[in-house]
Image (tube, helix red, strand yellow):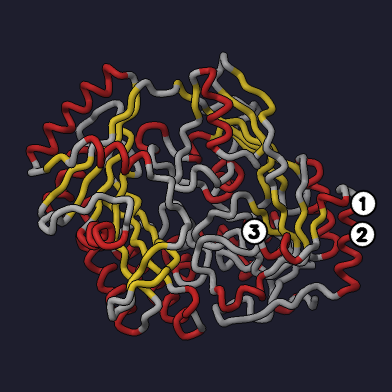
Amino acid sequence: MTTTFGATPFTNEPFTTPPLSDERLATLVTALRGVLADDQVLLAKTDRYNRARVPAPFPVHRWSERVPDVVVMPTSTEQVAQVVRIANDLKVPVVPRDGGTGLTDGAVPMHRGIVVDVKKMNQIHELDLVHRTVTVGTGINMLKLNERLAPHGLFYPDDPASYPCSLVGGRIGTSGWSLIGSRYGHTRDLVLSFDHVLPTGDVLHVGDGIGQQISKSSSGYQLKHLFMGHQGTLGIATRATLKLFPKPEAELSPFWAFDNYDDAHACTGALARAGVATFAGAVLFDEHKVAYLRRDDEAYIPQPADVRALVCAVMYGYEDEVRAGGRRLFRIAKEHGARYLGDEISEGDWAARHDRYATPLHGRTKDGQVIPMSWHCEDASITFANLPAVSRAWHEILADLRRRTDVFDDWGMFAYTNTSTGVDYLTEIDVGIWEQRLDEAAWAAWVEAKRAIAQVAIASGGSMSACHGSCREGEVDLLPQELGRGFDVMLDVKRVLDPNNIMNPGKYLLDRAYDRSTDAHR
């Protein structure tokens, strides 16, 4: 029997999944307490409400419709597997939650059910100094892990903006992107293997070959990437083995100012193509982003009005390498008309790269009124040559959105190298959202804008998401267009691995894998 939760599984129209009936909830809790301790099964309103929100602009005016029925906090792979088996038996949705920092609502329980919070699985199980690997529970975050690794002169270089609060398991489930990925690789490159609970409750070891520490195998299908970036729709990672690197002796993060976007864009590409071995990334901030920083960021030293774009390059490595590479990049920047902003701004702004994730920020209405807004961004992978055209098109979309409503503000764009070759860029447009004014009309306008932003990315030959995922309203509508036959394969995989549609239903249009006639009644 397959199960599709919710009243309208094949559209983006608002719908509500009711809470479990008292009888079904009692049956579920009794079963869960048979495999978990009482303090691992949470029913209090505060426990459930606190796990129903993420930083993304989930429609907060309908927030109460997405509160889980129960939260569980397992401590082992076997406990996770037992919870998932119970969910299959009782046909109750399961949603994994790690740090809850995702920007496409992957951890929001669209159809209530069980939220599996992995934060108690935060142990370091094995540190192998010979092979430079560490095996951890997926509930640990990179900050705490690196504190433990520092005395050994090693670090785990997965460095998202949400570094202090996102967890290893969430990074696997979203196939996360790292700020220094051009030097060390992104999550998919840094995770060697992991134990994974499938939607049926079976346990699979995912990696190259059967070993935990193997980085390359040609045995069979390469399954690791299949079980990364699925947004919790194909199971739950519980224990992972990660690559470690020597902690860098030096880092350099110069910021340069430009009086026009075109020169800054050209310089960014030249920096990425310079072939510097310690190159960890280059980022381009456009005029709208500079204006936002000048207007609203109290921690930022404002730039003169003639500064229309900023470029930052980042290098990590041994001191002699970074010095040599830095001289080359400074020479390239000067040739493109750059003006160095100085050590104070450069070091301070790079050091503060994690500090303001998911915090209320100052926004402006279309009439100029300054009010608190929440931050969101739409992201895509865009090739270098197409960045200027995509930037113009995206700002036009937001300008139209702002003309229609006071709820949104354009906070500018940045483009960040995905690889050391600079072929494509994580491209984000930051948006302020006045959540207190968010209603059905504003939400519909936002979804329309998200869809238009994604369409521009696809039309440019890019991908509509570089890191956050495209699993919710708006951009998700274009997933079949971007992936073509690949989307049909996704449906096939989902149907085979999750016959009861238990894992995170409502995401990635995967409910289409199931027959409407088998809709379940809660």
Question: Mark 2 or mark 3: which comes first in sequence?
Answer: 2
CB under 8 Å between discs 1 and 2? yes
Name the element at disc 3.
helix
Task: Determine the CA span between mark 2 and mark 3.
Answer: 29 Å
Residue type at mark 3 is Lys
Location of mark 2 (residue): 30
Location of mark 1 (residue): 34
Question: Mark 3 or mark 1: which comes first in sequence?
Answer: 1
Q: Is residue 47 left or right of residue 491?
A: right
Front one among 492 and 380: 380
Q: Is residue 39 left or right of residue 101?
A: right
Circle 3 packing at 10 Å, graded few (<14), some (14-19), many (20+), is many
Q: Position of residue 226 (x, y in %)?
A: 57, 47
The residue lying at 39 percent from left, 58 percent from top is: 379
Circle on res. 494 = 3
The residue lying at 29 percent from left, 26 percent from top is: 277
In this view, the mark in front (3 or 1):
1
Dividing the picture into quadrants, the one containing residue 119 is: top right
Relative height, residue 314 to residue 160 (above, below): above
Relative height, residue 416 to residue 152 (above, below): below
Q: Position of residue 354 (x, y in %)?
A: 43, 45
Name the element at disc 1.
loop
Circle 1 packing at 10 Å, graded few (<14), some (14-19), many (20+), is few
Task: Determine the CA span between mark 3 and mark 1.
Answer: 29 Å
Q: Is residue 117 among the parts visible in the rendering? A: yes
Name the element at disc 2.
helix
Front one among 253 and 209: 253
In this view, the mark in front (2 or 3):
2
Residue type at mark 2 is Thr
